[in-house]
Amino acid sequence: MIKRFLIKAGRKLKRLSGSGEKKKKTTSLPEQEPLHSTELQHTSSEKTVKTVQPAAAEQQRGAKGAAEGTAQNRPPRNPRRKKPRWTLEQFSVDPVEGKSRFHDFSLSLGLMHAIADLDFKYCTPIQEKALPDAMAGKDIIARAGTGTGKSAVFLVAVFARLINENKRHRQAEEKSPLRKPGFPRALIIAPTRELVMQIAKDGQALAKYAPLRVVAVYGGTDYQKQERVLAERPVDVLVATPGRLLDYVSKRVLNLQQAGIMVIDEADRMLDMGFIPDVRRIIYKMPPKEKRQTMLFSATLTEDVKHLASQWCVKPISIESKPEQVAIDTVRQVVYTVTSDEKYHVLYNLIKT
């Protein structure tokens, strides 16, 4: 009996001991949850920032120190010298009896500076006679051919009047009239493209130090390009051939209602080339003759030219001037009468000989 009891008791003890081991296995310490990818990135970036930031700061401090060192070692720059302002004393012209200087006229400093650059010291006869009346705003009909300096007469007179007009507005503390592109203040008409280009070139040289814009329009060149130049900004002085000018006026690219000064150069050639009807149409687009100044220059004062002046001018002052020397005495003039078929052969033989 006792033996059986011990065997059963031993079996129960074994069962009890087995169940205790299972409980120990199941009741182990809880494992930590795995970190998500974002958390891993955040923690890793924090670590990298903590490690990289001190190195970057050291580099910045080093670069700043190097820059300060180079700045301290760099020699100081010399201040930029301002260009001295031009004065009239720099353009000294001694007075000569019987000759007029540009100093004798009330011209602006900028205009005198340009005249000095061009080395215009004494006036030619046409300049001496015409400049006082032209600058006073009077209408003029002048006999002056090529080489007399007539271009300087109307260019200087036009520029002087426009500059004085701007000055009057400033002194009166008035606002200048609203300027728009395509509304010139002065108009100069010439018969040929070459003459227009030359006048515009001379005008730009004289307006070098003045707040004036000179633009030329003529045929035989890019139409759109000239139109863009006119549309860029306001024009003070427009130099033009009649045909191209009328074209722009008809298409409303140009408006001549604000052009208070008109100059017609080489009026006799205008007549010969048949431009007078075009000039009439241009004049009709401008202010009436009582409200504008008209200057007419011609190599010859024929009856036709005088008739035109009486129509377009108000009590014009007639001025005549001959060139100092029309032709050199040593030049021999010869005329060869040939047919149209022979002229090229004759010209070739003359050049060859």
Image (cartoon, grey):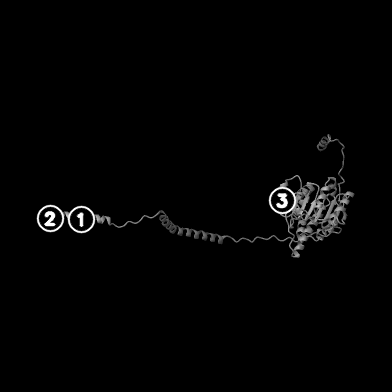
Q: Quadrant of the C terminus?
A: top right
Disc 1 crowd rating (10 Å Cα; few below 14, some 14-19, many 20+) is: few
Q: Which residue is mark 1?
A: 17
The kind of residue tagged 1 is Ser
Q: Callout 2 environment at 10 Å: few (<14), some (14 to 19), or many (20+)?
A: few
Q: Quadrant of residue 93?
A: bottom right
Asked if disc 3 and disc 2 are in contact, CB closer than 8 Å, the reply is: no
Q: Percent from the top left, x then y, of residue 235?
A: 74, 54
Residue 217 horizontal side relative to residue 138, left or right: left
**Can the viewer see residue 8?**
yes
Distance Cα–Cα, label 2 vs label 1: 19 Å
Q: Which residue is mark 3?
A: 229
Mark 1 residue element: helix
Q: Nearer the viewer, residue 351 or 143?
A: 143
Relative to 27, 98 lies left or right:
right
Q: Which mark is residue 5?
A: 2
**Counting residues from the N terminus, which is met first, the one under dot 3 or under dot 1?**
1
Q: Amino acid at mark 2?
A: Phe
User: First in sequence: mark 3 or mark 2?
Assistant: 2
Q: Residues within 10 Å of mark 3 (few under 14, many from 20)?
A: some
Give the mark, 2 or 1, whose residue is nearer the N terminus: 2
